[in-house]
Image (cartoon, rainbow, N blue to C red):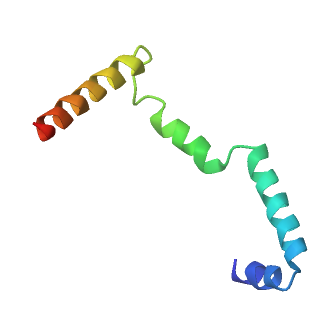
Amino acid sequence: METVTLLADRLSLYDQHLLAAHLAQNLNRTPSRSSRAIEGLWKDAVPPDFDVDAALREIRSEWLKEWGERNE
């Protein structure tokens, strides 16, 4: 990484911009290995019938109660 950084610093600002755009484009093409690994780790952690919307409503209602108690 240090070598790449030293070489990139030698480029003109325009070429550094092109390099950054090229790297960003490559990152957006395929999911990273780490994101695929995370998918595998969480695959069985949440039941398939889990209602995310209901859980979020419950969490938000608790926040509203807390905020209301603080403002009283």
Q: Judge left or right: residue 19 versus residue 70.
A: right
Q: Quadrant of residue 5?
A: bottom right
Quadrant containing the N terminus is bottom right
Quadrant containing the C terminus is top left
Viewer-nearest residue: 3 or 67: 67
Q: Position of residue 62 (x, y in %)?
A: 22, 29
Q: Quadrant of residue 16?
A: bottom right
Count numbered badges in the picture. 0
Viewer-nearest residue: 8 or 38: 8
Q: Is residue 2 above or below residue 14?
A: below
Q: Is residue 34 above or below residue 42?
A: below
Q: Judge left or right: residue 53 versus residue 26.
A: left
Q: Judge left or right: residue 9 versus residue 43.
A: right
Q: Position of residue 46 (x, y in %)?
A: 40, 26
Residue at (24% x, 33% y) in the render: 63
Q: Position of residue 47 (x, y in %)?
A: 40, 20
Residue at (52% x, 43% y) in the render: 38
Q: Is residue 60 above or below residue 35?
A: above
Q: Quadrant of residue 17?
A: bottom right
Q: Position of residue 50 (x, y in %)?
A: 39, 18
Residue at (15% x, 39% y) in the render: 71
Q: Judge left or right: residue 36 versus residue 54.
A: right
**As drawn, which residue projects farthest toward the top?**
49
